[in-house]
Image: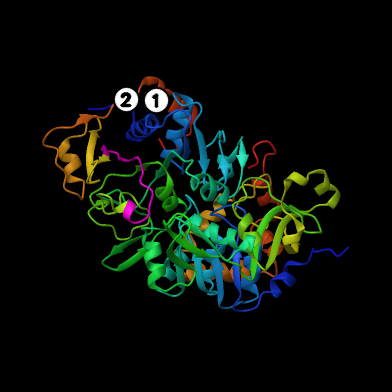
Amino acid sequence: MSLPYTTNELMAVTAARLLRDGENVVVGLGLPQIAALLAQNTHAPNLTIIYEIGVINPEAEEMGVGVADPRLWYKAEHFTSFVGTLGAILQKGLIDVGFLGGLQVDKYGNINSTLVKTEKGTRHINGSGGAADMATMARRLLIMMRHEKRKIVDSLDYLTSVGYLRGYDSRKEEGLPVPEDVKIITNLCVFGFDEKTKAIKVLSIHPGVKPEDVIQNTGVALDLSSGVKTTDEPTAEEIDLLRKKIDPQRMYI
Amino acid sequence: MNSKVRALKDIVAEIPDGAHIALGGFAITRNPVAFVFELIRQGKKNLTVYQIVGGMETDLLVGAGLVKRLEYSAGSLDRFGRLERINEAIDKKLIDVREYSGTSMALRFLAGSMGIPFIPTKYLLGTEMLKVLLEKKDDAVRVERSPFDGEKYVYLKALQPDFAIIHAQYADEKGNVIIEGPYWDVETAKSAKKLFVTVEKVVSTEFVKRHPEKVIIPSVYVHAVAEVPFGAFPNAVYKCYDYDKEMLEEYAEVSKDGEKFKKFVDEYILGTKDFEEFLEKVGGVRRLNKIKADPVYGY
């Protein structure tokens, strides 16, 4: 079945719809940034977008190569420091949604963005930057990543950013504030977490994707026997905005 | 009045082997590249480097063998690539690396900038960064309950490095530093015992007095200023110039391979007498004109 939108577009739209008007969102580059801009251009005009480097509510006309790209700072409302964003606004509890990506995520939503262990030994990748901090303090976490068996796993090679830690009340026991919600949006489905055990579960499967595809590409055992719903499709207006206004150079969609 | 403006070579010469230095760059922007080139030219040894998010400058320092210990949260060339010399040094255990989260690094600098001994935070709790730091018995990190709310916090020891080095757009000769755009590195700068600032241009104090709100770091914090136009090249400086895509791509490629990296350092750093000669060597005014910032967009 061929759909009139790309998987990245569907992911961006799905994430955008999870943002509410008036919320404060910390984003990184790529799909999270695109999702936040789409929300701002549709149902959430009062969304505040924050980049950890110290930029608040810019109106970039071009996509950049990272939050350190001055393209992303165009027409900002405020410039501050790293302490001003994640040291103050986030730590004070004013961030509603933190967007995260990573190399691996486990069944409790914990993320590894630091290293991978291979047969040849440990390979260090990038490090956490502000991601671990967002995972600690944001009220809700939205994780976006490619869906592969080696990326959604039972246990991580390294725990960079805390999700629900070891499930149940483990986060609280560790002295951490407990997030209201954690969701993972992949190219195949949307995951949420069980209210009590905090274990991963499928919330919806993207149009055209079979349940077996999700099971086969996930490194954690999933039970889909009682059926799951299909992810809502993007509207023509959303796709139009993405292509014409938000990412006209098609860098990320 | 004594001017704080000095030659880059001379301020770099003030840094002894074994010094603890903090750097202000962030991935591909406002990196003190010219300063780092000069550190490498002068053959400094056994440095301890502190930074929130590193870029090419820190990768060069590690790759050229100047660094004995690195404390940071992450680093990359953004979409252009990874910091391969640092990654390899970590994998092969060539340097002592202490990894923090971005904010825990920034808060260590904040505490240092305020002259307080430590700062409490929830950041790092539950992470493997914390686990590793505790296993290494790092004296900068303790987990304690707060006497006020009884909650568990990570207590981070204040960082006051011997030197901080940042690159900014402007400063006057008194050392009032104007930063345009975000200033993620202001606490890093203020935390150090001695702050060195390289700037695109030294401006008059008359100019500063007409725009005091643009002064992000007042002169009281500043030890010396060096004027180094294009001193962050090939990285970006907001309102001055964009990053040089070709050179970052070249670096991303050569840094994957030890031999090619060494050739890069030999040719561009050790093979030039100063940063100006390096800029000339890679294309001079013709190349730099291409990345000059548009005054409206700032890139």
Looking at the image, is mark 1 or mark 2 nearer the viewer? 1
In the depicted structure, whether residue B270 falls above or below residue B184: below
Residue B233, picture quadrant = bottom right
Q: Does the magenta stretch include residue B155?
A: no
Quarter of the figure that contains the C terminus of chain B: top right
Q: In this view, does B268 lie above or below A9?
A: below
The residue wearing badge 2 is: A4
Horizontal relation, residue B162 to residue B136: left or right = right
Where in the figure is residue B114, as x and y percent of width and height?
63, 60
Q: Which of A142 and B283 is in front in this view?
A: A142
Q: In which quarter of the image is the N terminus of chain B?
A: bottom right
Would you name the residue on which mark 1 appears? A239
Q: Looking at the image, can residue B194 be seen?
A: yes
Going from N to C along the chain, the mark reached first, 1 or 2, is 2
Compared to residue A93, the image places residue A237 above or below, namely above
Is the residue marked by circle 2 packed among few (<14), some (14-19), or many (20+) residues within 10 Å? few
Image quarter of residue A55 = top right
Q: Is residue B233 visible?
A: no
Q: Tag 2, which secondary structure?
A: loop
Q: Residue B269: x, y in percent?
A: 62, 68
Subunit ID for the residue under disc 2: A
Mark 1 and mark 2 in contact? Answer it, CB < 8 Å.
yes
Q: Do marks 1 and 2 share a chain?
A: yes
Q: Residue at x 38, y 68 (%)?
A: B132
| Mark 1–mark 2 distance (CA, rounded to whole Å) | 9 Å
**Residue A174 lies in magenta, yes or no?**
yes
Q: Which amino acid does label 1 sit on?
A: Ile
Residues rendered magenta in the picture:
A172-191
The residue nearer to you, when weighing A239 against B251, is A239
